[in-house]
């Protein structure tokens, strides 16, 4: 099984929210997740948009999981805001 860290879409019409999850790479976008690592709400204020457990992300990356482009961009975004 190849695990992938990616987004799972949730929310209402015109109010999307996403959970950042670890899933089998062959599973559908909204399928069953192995583990939830955080969430992303693009319509919220800047400080409430992203919550991510970086320790769990690093643990899954050590196990061999790959990241989607969007999940990688969000991880970099959180790292930049943590440095400021």
Image (cartoon, rainbow, N blue to C red):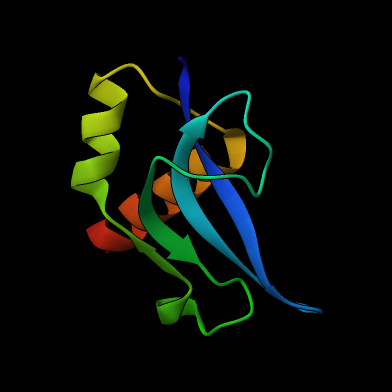
Relative to 45, does residue 27 appear above or below in the rendering? above
Residue in view at x 48 percent, y 73 percent: 49
- Looking at the image, which is closer to me, 37 or 50? 37
Where residue 11 sits: x, y (%)? 66, 74
Relative to 51, does residue 7 appear above or below in the rendering? above
- Rendering quarter of residue 53: bottom left
- Quarter of the image with the C terminus is bottom left
Residue in view at x 23 percent, y 21 percent: 62
Relative to 7, does residue 41 appear above or below in the rendering? below
Image side of residue 68 versus residue 84, left or right: right
Residue in view at x 41 percent, y 47 percent: 75
Residue extending farthest front: 32
Residue in view at x 38 percent, y 52 percent: 36
- Quarter of the image with the N terminus is top left
Relative to 36, does residue 59 appear above or below in the rendering? above
Residue extending farthest right: 13
- Rendering quarter of residue 42: bottom right
Where residue 39 sits: x, y (%)? 45, 63
Where residue 10 sits: x, y (%)? 64, 66
Count of numbered labels shown in the rendering: 0
């Amino acid at each position: 099984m190849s695990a992938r860290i990616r987004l799972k879409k949730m929310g209402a019409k015109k109010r999307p929210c996403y959970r950042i999850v670890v899933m089998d790479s062959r599973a559908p976008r909204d399928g069953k997740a192995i583990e939830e690592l955080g969430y992303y709400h693009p319509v919220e204020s800047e400080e409430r948009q992203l919550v991510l457990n970086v320790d769990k992300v690093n643990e899954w990356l050590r196990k061999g999981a790959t990241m989607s482009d969007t999940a990688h961009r969000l991880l970099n975004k959180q790292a930049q805001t943590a440095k400021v």
